[in-house]
Amino acid sequence: GTESNAGVYLHSFLFDEVKISGSGNDAVVSVPGVNFVGVVKSGSNTYHGSALAAYQGPSLQSSNLNDTLRGQGLTEAEPLQYYYGVAGDLGGKIIHDKLWFYGAYAKQSRVSAVLGFAGDPGADGRYLTADDVPADSESSLDSGALKLSWQATPKHRILGVMTPSLKYQPQR
């Protein structure tokens, strides 16, 4: 059978237009399931850009650890060490009315404990026992885009798009 899985991570502000359909697709979509179509932003004769930043630390996190969960042997929830996300994009002209660029970069990073994930077996030397030492799990995602648009003739525009991404999860 044909598979159409994508391990691509794209930041939402990369797109001018997005269409996501979950069912009822027409004959243009050759396989069943979710379909995503996105039009990456382009440069223009004026420069445009945006930036964003987000942060969350332990002081901004609550806990759902209650007596019921403690009764099941849990001693802590999933404490967050930190989360941050930064992103920016810029587009504009290289040659007026002829050649334009658009570029974007985003990074997200998170470090938190994961229930049941142990960094050390504890005093008894055995994993999966009550004295396991909890460990943090880290995850980061770097993604970007570069698009060049060239008006080769009045009727023909040539586009080139590159969208590199790197997902890093060393504990997996």
Image: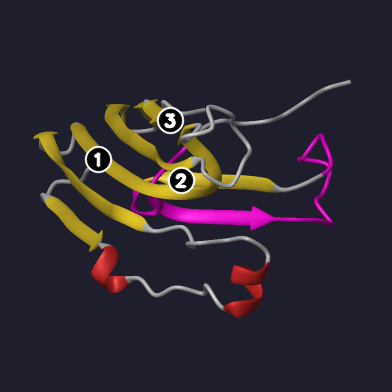
Q: Quadrant of the N terminus?
A: top right
Q: CA distance from mark 3 to mark 2?
A: 29 Å
Query: Is residue 163 at all visible to an observer of this figure?
Result: no
Q: Position of residue 69 (x, y in %)?
A: 62, 70
Q: Which residues are magenta?
A: 9-32
Check contact, mark 3 vs mark 1: CB within 8 A.
Answer: no
Q: Is residue 112 above or below residue 107?
A: below
Looking at the image, which is closer to me, 38 or 65?
65
Residue that mark 2 sits on: 39
Q: Is residue 116 left or right of residue 46?
A: right
Of the two numbered discs 3 and 2 in the rendering, the one whose residue sits closer to the viewer: 3
Sequence order check: which comes first, mark 1 or mark 2?
A: 2
Looking at the image, which is closer to me, 9 or 24?
9
Give residue 104's mark.
1
Q: Amino acid at mark 2?
A: Val
Quarter-wise, where is residue 142 in the image? top left
Sequence order check: which comes first, mark 3 or mark 1?
A: 1
Sequence order check: which comes first, mark 3 or mark 2?
A: 2
Residue that mark 3 sits on: 169
